Image: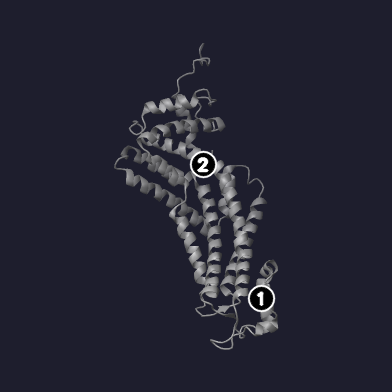
């Protein structure tokens, strides 16, 4: 079932289960919504509590939930805010993205010097870390695709996807789900004074959605990590550019680390791809010697070309691959949002709703000659 439809059905189901007397959602409204959902539309056979949920069942429940929500909004407009909180981003997204940018920006100043090292060791650290992540992602993707029979059903696919996640991703997915739950609970607490009959059902919906929406939370957490890596790289680029273009710090290197020939080889390894794409040349070993620090304050040269090389390297090795990962994860998120599994409790819920429908006059009576 699609995310929006499933959330509506979950919300109505939770309210009905928590409000048996019909104080928040009257029994008359429920019966009328059932008749409206069944009017002229294909519906599943009534009375079979063991029948699995199929397309007709899902569409029937979704139509009924929409009809009930339309009535509920008249008395309690806050239900739309609850649904929006369940579907939308949280403050966790903004906090982690801001933290990623600030981390990258601060890494540009980690050496504490008033000059820019052309070897850009923070950049090397970020590139190596991202390369390790790419290798792990590729290995996990091939390993999961090579397992026979694992894609047989949605539950199996979800179990495989969970196994592919590392500890940090699983922790972030749980944190994401808990933040969504807390956000909904805050909205309920603020409105409980004038919406007390609905509060138990809304809290039950929040708990149900935290379980049912796990595949979405996991994909959101993955995408959030990719965006954080992108912003960390952008923060590093911004910090280096700030040092070079605004603070006018010179760029150079220490001869105690490399000789001119080995320095040129290392720089070609680091910046070779960026130089090929951008057209910014890497100085020869002889030219590099002129950029060596001769003292704590002397040596080096203009930082312009090195800033271009740093920026292009970050773009090629971090930003662009992570953007591809964001696109892939977003497509996976859309797929999961369109194919969410209905909870097992919906089978009995559907049977109870169908039994409450009046017998159709045009259908032949069951067991008429028994």
Residue drawn at point x = 63 percent, y = 42 percent: 152
Going 35% across and 38% down the picture, which residue do you hit?
198
Alpha carbon distance from label 1 to label 2: 49 Å
Marks 1 and 2, the one that precedes in the sequence: 2
Q: Position of residue 293 (x, y in %)?
A: 59, 85
- Side of 233 where 263 appears, left or right: right
From the image, tell me which residue sits under label 2: 3
- Extreme residue toward the top, this view: 369
Q: Residues within 10 Å of mark 1 (few under 14, many from 20)?
A: some
Examine the rendering and report whether any part of residue 286 can be seen.
yes
Q: Position of residue 108 (x, y in %)?
A: 53, 72
Of residues 335 and 309, the one drawn nearer to the viewer in this rendering: 309
x, y (%) of residue 191?
33, 44
Is residue 265 positioned above or below 350 on the image? Answer: below
Side of 185 where 175 appears, left or right: right
Secondary structure under tag 1 reads helix
268 above or below 368? below
Residue at coordinates 48% horizontally, 28% vertically from top-left? 351
Mark nearest the camera among 1 and 2 is 1
Identify the secondary structure beneath mark 2: helix
Question: In the rendered view, how is the structure colored?
Answer: one colour
Which residue is disc 1 drawn over? 267
Is residue 62 found left or right of 288 in the rendered image? left
Up-down relation of residue 61 to residue 92 (above or below): above
Q: Whole-percent x and y of residue 88? A: 47, 48
């Amino acid at each position: 079932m699609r995310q929006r439809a499933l959330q509506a059905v979950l919300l109505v189901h939770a309210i009905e289960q928590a409000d048996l007397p019909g104080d928040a959602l009257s029994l008359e409204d429920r019966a009328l919504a059932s008749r409206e959902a069944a009017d002229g539309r294909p519906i599943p056979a009534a009375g079979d509590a063991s029948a699995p949920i199929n397309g007709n069942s899902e569409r029937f429940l979704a139509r009924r939930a929409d009809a009930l929500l339309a009535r509920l909004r008249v008395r309690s407009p806050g239900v739309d805010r609850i649904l929006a909180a369940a579907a939308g981003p949280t403050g966790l997204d903004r906090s982690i993205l801001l933290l990623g940018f600030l981390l990258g920006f601060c890494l540009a100043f980690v050496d504490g010097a008033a000059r820019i090292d052309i070897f850009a060791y923070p950049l090397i650290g970020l590139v190596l870390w991202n390369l390790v992540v790419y290798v792990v992602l590729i290995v996990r993707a091939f390993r999961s695709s090579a397992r026979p029979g694992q894609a047989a059903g949605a539950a199996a696919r979800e179990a495989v996807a969970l196994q592919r996640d590392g500890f940090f991703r699983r922790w972030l997915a749980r944190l994401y789900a808990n933040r969504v739950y807390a956000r909904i609970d805050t909205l309920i607490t603020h409105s409980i004074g004038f919406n007390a009959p609905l509060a138990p059902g809304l809290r039950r919906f929040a708990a149900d959605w935290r379980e049912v929406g796990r595949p979405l939370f996991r994909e959101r957490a993955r995408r959030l990590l990719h965006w954080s890596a992108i912003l960390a790289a952008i923060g590093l680029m911004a910090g280096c550019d700030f040092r070079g273009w605004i603070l006018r710090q010179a760029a150079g290197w220490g001869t105690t680390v490399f000789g001119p020939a080995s320095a040129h080889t290392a720089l070609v390894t680091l910046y070779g791809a960026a130089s090929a794409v951008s057209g910014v040349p890497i100085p020869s070993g002889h030219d590099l010697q002129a950029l060596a620090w001769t003292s704590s304050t002397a040596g080096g040269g203009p930082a312009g070309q090195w800033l271009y090389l740093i920026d292009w390297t970050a773009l090629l090795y971090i930003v662009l691959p992570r953007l591809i990962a964001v696109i892939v994860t977003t497509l996976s998120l859309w797929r999961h949002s369109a194919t969410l599994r209905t909870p097992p409790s919906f089978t009995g819920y559907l049977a109870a709703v169908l039994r409450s429908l009046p017998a159709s006059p045009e259908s032949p009576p069951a067991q008429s000659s028994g």
